[in-house]
Image (cartoon, rainbow, N blue to C red):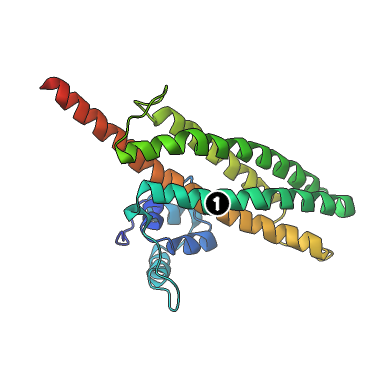
Amino acid sequence: MTVLDALTPVGELVATCSGRARVFEQLGIDYCCGGKTPLAMACAERGLDLSKVLEELNEADAPAGEEPPVDWSQATLADVIDDVVTTHHTYLRRALPRLESLAAKVAIAHWERHPEILRVHELLGDLRADLSVHMIKEEMILFPMIQRLEAGEPVLGVFAGDLGGPIEVIEHEHARYAAKLHEMRRITRNFAPPADACPSFRALLAGLAELEDDLHRHVHKENNVLFPRASALVHARASRLKGRRAC
């Protein structure tokens, strides 16, 4: 577990103790796409008292009566990939169609008083279409390459010698999806149900908040755990090959 330090990137803090994600979610600190930001800077950007944030993180490190937090920095890359696919990809494939359908239902009933729901429905449709392709690219191309690298097996294909390009594309897509969810949060006033919200409206907003939380954890595991370690494997392999040629 990474010791709490003001200069440590927030993504690294969560990578070694998953329970810290809950604190950052509550404080609005971006630990996924903004995972490279040092804790002190992240607190300053949000106008937060660093000492109080450190106290909350210390409490999260030892939650009473809960399972111990996962240190993903010590897991194999194959285990990280398995968790991303079975936990987060499975969740998205189940949740996105349901939320898109629910948004259509709410829009029909409430669009005149709450026109922002029309935009929510549009954004969910875009997100579902984009993530469907995104997950296939990861599961069929990038993840198998990383698994073969970790196993020391030959990696064939255009990107066999460098994962930088594919990873950069995936991270750019992550940022785009986060922006769509941020817009949904903004136009729904932090997913707060209006006074006249029906049960479906409230369920939609609760589902959007859950979707955002899951996507943050999902992207964090890839951007701040999986991709840096996979890139390090590529560089280590390149160094070994270079050394053999020199001999």
Quadrant location, the C terminus: top left
Q: Is residue 89 left or right of residue 198?
A: left
Could you say which is closer to the camera, residue 1 or residue 190? 1
Q: Is residue 232 above or below residue 115?
A: above
User: Which residue is pictured at 51% across the width and 37% down the height?
Assistant: 138
235 with respect to 60 (left or right): left
Image: 120 above or below 72: above
Q: Nearer the viewer, residue 94 or 68?
A: 94
Residue 239, percent from left and from top: 21, 30
Q: Position of residue 145 (x, y in %)?
A: 41, 34
Amino acid bearing label 1:
His
Q: Confirm whether residue 144 shows in the render.
A: yes
The residue that appears at 15% across and 26% down in the rendered structure is 243
The residue that mark 1 highlights is 88
User: For residue 244, which quarter of the picture?
Assistant: top left
Does residue 114 appear anywhere in the picture?
no
Q: Position of residue 177 (x, y in %)?
A: 59, 42
Identify the residue at horizontal 38%, vertical 68% (top origin).
61
Compare residues 39 and 88 and report the one nearer the observer: 88
Residue furthest to the front: 153
Residue 165 lies, with reference to residue 226, above or below; the image says: above
Residue that lies at the very extreme toward the bottom in this rendered image: 65
Dot 1 alpha-carbon crowd within 10 angstroms: few under 14, some 14 to 19, many 20 or more: some
